[in-house]
Amino acid sequence: MRIAILGSSRGRVKDIAKVTNEDLDNFVNNLSDILSEKVSEVRVVPENSLYFDVAQAFRKKGGKVIGIVPEGDKIYGYDWLKPNLDKIDEKVVAQDWYWMSHHLFQNTDEVLCLSMSAGVFSDLGILKYLIGHKKLEIKKLIVYKPFLSEGKLPLEVEDVFKGILVYADTLEEIEKELSV
């Protein structure tokens, strides 16, 4: 199975969830154990973030990490991603940041959302249109509740993912929800 992982920075998660770096290190290690048993590859943007930490731990356990890199972007660039390009197994080039989400979700079975940011909202907007216009089929959107400020997605976002949205309160629930 192949998944895309979304999320935000460690700092944002620490502030919202009131957890420590040690808590996050344990979360990363335990989630990567689960993923290494259930998932063959993960797709991520290789930026410094909690979800990229999970991808790196998954890679160390034998999983394949595909990084989506907007190399063609002439407005924002991608310099902050360059230090992490040697930490991925395969690079998929997107023409810019706007197309990055499209490439992130291609060839994935499920999406795992660990936390929220403005970028994640943008990614979810693109995912909605890709699903709605039958450009791809995602079995599940699994959202980890403990790292969300309100404990769930806004109703306006929940509504567009009816039928595939699943919330997880624990790592055990993520494990249960990941398809085999």
Image (spheres, grey):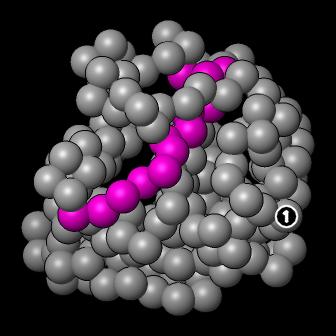
144 or 17, nearer to the observer: 144
* SS of the residue under disc 1: helix
Q: Which residues are magenta?
A: 135-149
The answer to whether residue 80 of the structure is visible from this angle is no
Quadrant in which the N terminus is drawn: bottom right
20 or 95, nearer to the observer: 95
12 or 92, nearer to the observer: 92
Task: Check disc 1 and give the amino acid type.
Answer: Glu
For the point 19% across and 46% down, the residue is 132
Q: Provide residue 42's location: percent of width, then percent of height.
A: 59, 68
Is residue 164 in the magenta section? no
The outermost residue toward the left is 75
For the point 45% across and 37% down, the residue is 164
Quadrant in which the C terminus is drawn: bottom right
Q: Which residue is mark 1?
A: 37
Up-down: is 7 above or below 62?
above
Horizontal side, residue 28 vs residue 123: left or right: right
Query: Based on the displayed image, in which of its 4 quarters is residue 2 positioned?
Result: bottom right
Circle 1 Cα neighbour tier, 10 Å, few/some/many (<14 / 14–19 / ≥20): few
Horizontal side, residue 65 vs residue 123: left or right: right
Up-down: is 18 above or below 105?
above
For the point 25% across and 18% down, the residue is 156
Query: Based on the displayed image, in which of its 4 quarters is residue 116 positioned?
Result: top left
Q: Provide residue 22's location: percent of width, then percent of height.
A: 87, 38
Q: Provide residue 137's location: percent of width, then percent of height.
A: 36, 58
Q: Provide residue 113's location: percent of width, then percent of height.
A: 53, 41
For the point 60% across and 52% down, the residue is 51
Horizontal side, residue 115 vs residue 133: left or right: right
Is residue 148 in the magenta section? yes
Up-down: is 169 above or below 113?
above
